[in-house]
Amino acid sequence: MSEALYDLSGLAASLQAALDEEVPPDAGVDAPAMELTVPTRPEHGDVTTNAALVAARRAGRAPRDLAAAVGARWMAGPGAGVCDRYEVAGPGFLNLFLADSWYRGALQRLLVEGGEYGRDVLPVARRLKMNVEFVSVNPTGPLHVGHARYASYGDALCRILAFAGHEVTREFYVNDHGTQMLRFGQSLAARYGQRLGLDTRVPDDGYQGEYLLDLADELIAAVGDRYREALAAVAPDVTTLPPDVTGEIRVWGRDSILARFRATLERLRVPFDVWTPESTLYEGGREHRGFGGEVGQSLADLDGERLLYEDGGAVWLSTTRYGDDKDRVLIRQTGDPTYFLSDIAYHRDKMERGFEHMIDIWGADHHGYVPRMKAAFTALPPHDPDKLELIIGQLVNLLESGETRRMSKRRGDIVTVDDLVDAIGVDAARFLLVGRSHDTTLDLDIDLAVQQSSQNPVYYVQYAHARICSILRNLPPGAGPAGEAVPAVVVGPYERALLRTLARFPEVLLGAAEQRAPHRVHNYLGELAAEFHVFYRHCRVLSDAADVTAFRSGLCAAVRTTLATGLGLLGVAAPDSM
């Protein structure tokens, strides 16, 4: 019997084959995808499906008759070895009562595959070379709690996509070109001057945060008073500082901020494969319309498609041809590029690198940017909008003693990622930040995050893992799981419930990968931990019967491994003790 049968997705695939035989494709009827659910009442079976109800009309058969035919056909084939019986219930539900042999087979598969259980769940034909770009903020100040959510979500998504079977490259796009970087350079120059005793003022539209004072101290330690004379000559107005001086200070500040980014993200367990500076998109290559690099080539491509035109001294892209509500400026009247032009060039660059699918994870304030980016991407050869997926994340509210903390990077009133990790630890931050769907606002309660109780979701799951480690450590020699062998014991109701939850793991991973939903893994881990605690309350692992002890300890080991795998996919540790 195929090992694939011993999880719910494999069981569904086996039943799907029986349904397809009853409703063959050459009959002009598309059979629905078989979905299994676990009934809330045990008298309705171990698993149930409404597939016959959905397919009956198109098949021209009564739902109950079709359900009975599918059940009989399946029981005459692969179902015979894993199912005691089936029932047709209500208007046409097919309820399956699985045999002890199915549960023992499920446990054996779990023990054989260990930490690989659920890996490569995605069919080979659907695996892609993917690029996931996330966080990607201007290097103008510390990463704050909002960035922590996007970092945790993006990293967990990448881990899940790769585990499911995709080839994933994680990318950080460094927005180091344009007006905001100029304002940052001027703000740092002003703080540097102040530290040297000059009356240099941060521009009104500059960055006011106190972190710039620390950065200015580091700049003085690195270069001394190199820029003092230039600043004294223009004080108090740093906006009139010679461009080469502002540029040097800006680049130094950018590199220093990026070093902080790397350290913070490493602390948060968020690695990146590629860091792409926006400034490099303007470098090299043949110039077109006054721009080189990927920017120039993008302009050349768009000109080749006859999509650029000039109006009012600016250069416009005809994005309305591809669904945007209005055309967009790429080159201003001043000859300066817009951010949109850089973004187009950046996505062209990613296509040139051979990615079959690209995912961008953006903040809530980018919602209105989606139609124009999709239009511009479609305008670029090969004109395939399906290659680009834009995910918009929502805000995170930080709660302390029931109060919401407000944040602004410009004002300096921010709670940084490092502040958050200092307060609640990496594990709590990572787990709680993916606790809800990315498209809903998340309230992160600091008081709850530090509680060592069942009310704290991460503590609850980690405690289950640690408890199992303790159980297995304390078993007498020879009383633990007998390797991958599963004894032929009678499987009780609590063991069955726990094994059904374990058997769902590949299905959960597939859904999390396809729906871009790490919170599904988060929720599943809570369910698995809860099911384990129920099992532990009702079933003694160290039994008077050696076979029962071997079975239950093997079941504990399978839960421990699955919890560790799931936590790892969310970037959370699985402690052996707590």
Image: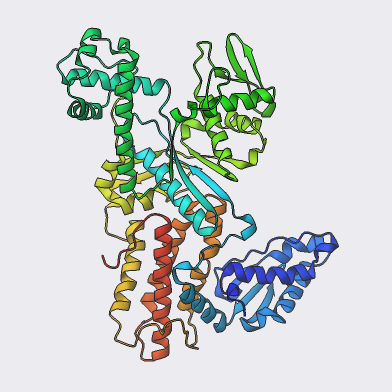
Q: Residue at x 61, y 78 (%)?
A: 97
Q: Can you tell which quarter of the image residue 15 is in? A: bottom right
Q: Position of residue 162 (x, y in %)?
A: 50, 55
Foreground of the two, 510 or 532? 510
User: How many discs mark residues in the rendered view?
Assistant: 0
Q: Position of residue 386 (x, y in %)?
A: 64, 41
- Residue placed at 85% from the left, 63% from the top? 27
Does residue 406 show up? no
Q: Could you tell me which quadrant the C terminus lies in?
A: bottom left
**Is 486 in front, or is 351?**
351
* Drawn side of residue 539 relative to residue 121, left or right: left
Quadrant of the snapshot with the N terminus: bottom right
For residue 79, above or below residue 450: below
Relative to 419, residue 546 above or below: below
Does 124 sit left or right of 361 as displayed? right
Given the current orientation, which residue lies at the most extreme left position? Answer: 197
What scheme was used to colour the molecule?
A: rainbow
Is residue 428 something that shows in the picture?
yes
Frontmost residue, 439 versus 60? 439
Identify the residue at image location x=32%, y=15%. Answer: 204
Q: Nearer the viewer, residue 575 or 119?
A: 119
Q: Position of residue 187 (x, y in %)?
A: 29, 20
Residue 235 x %, y %: 23, 9
